[in-house]
Image (cartoon, rainbow, N blue to C red):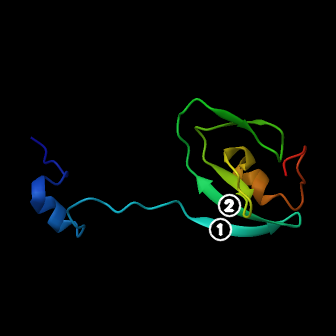
Amino acid sequence: MPRSNRPRGRRGARRSGRPSGPRPLQLPATTQVEFAGQAWTVRQVRGNDTGRSFRCPGCQQELSAALGHTVVWPSEGMQGLENRRHWHTACWNARGTRPPGGSWA
């Protein structure tokens, strides 16, 4: 019978160097960017299959929530979720050379 590589019980946790116990809550990393004369907060999100879709302001194409993408919102005056914009990561990275196709600010 082949050997299992999965650690079992407490011994495996000690061997891996990870502390046993609850993991601390970590918020996704955000960065501040100046774009179009305004300060923006940017966060990379990984995909989750919620069934939702968004319209990318860079290319005006549909963006599935199942794909990893970039979420951008104004740094000041965030009044709710309606100010967030979901971009394809490639569209956000090319925002200086390829301006948005519609109103997004």
Q: Position of residue 30 (x, y in %)?
A: 61, 64
Using the rendered image of the protein, determine whether residue 87 is visible from the camera's viewpoint: no
Determine whether the residue tagged by mark 1 lies in a helix, strand or loop. strand
Badge number at residue 89: none
Depth order, front residue of 57/104: 104
Measured Cα–Cα span from mark 1 to mark 2: 5 Å
Determine whether the residue tagged by mark 2 lies in a helix, strand or loop. strand
Dot 2 amino acid type? Val
Query: Which residue is the site of mark 2?
Result: 42
Q: Position of residue 15 (x, y in %)?
A: 16, 67
Q: Are marks 1 and 2 in contact (CB under 8 Å)?
A: yes
Dot 1 amino acid type? Thr
Query: Which residue is the site of mark 1?
Result: 31
Horizontal relation, residue 47 to residue 8: left or right: right
- Above/below status of 97 relative to 46: below
Horizontal relation, residue 52 to residue 103: left or right: left
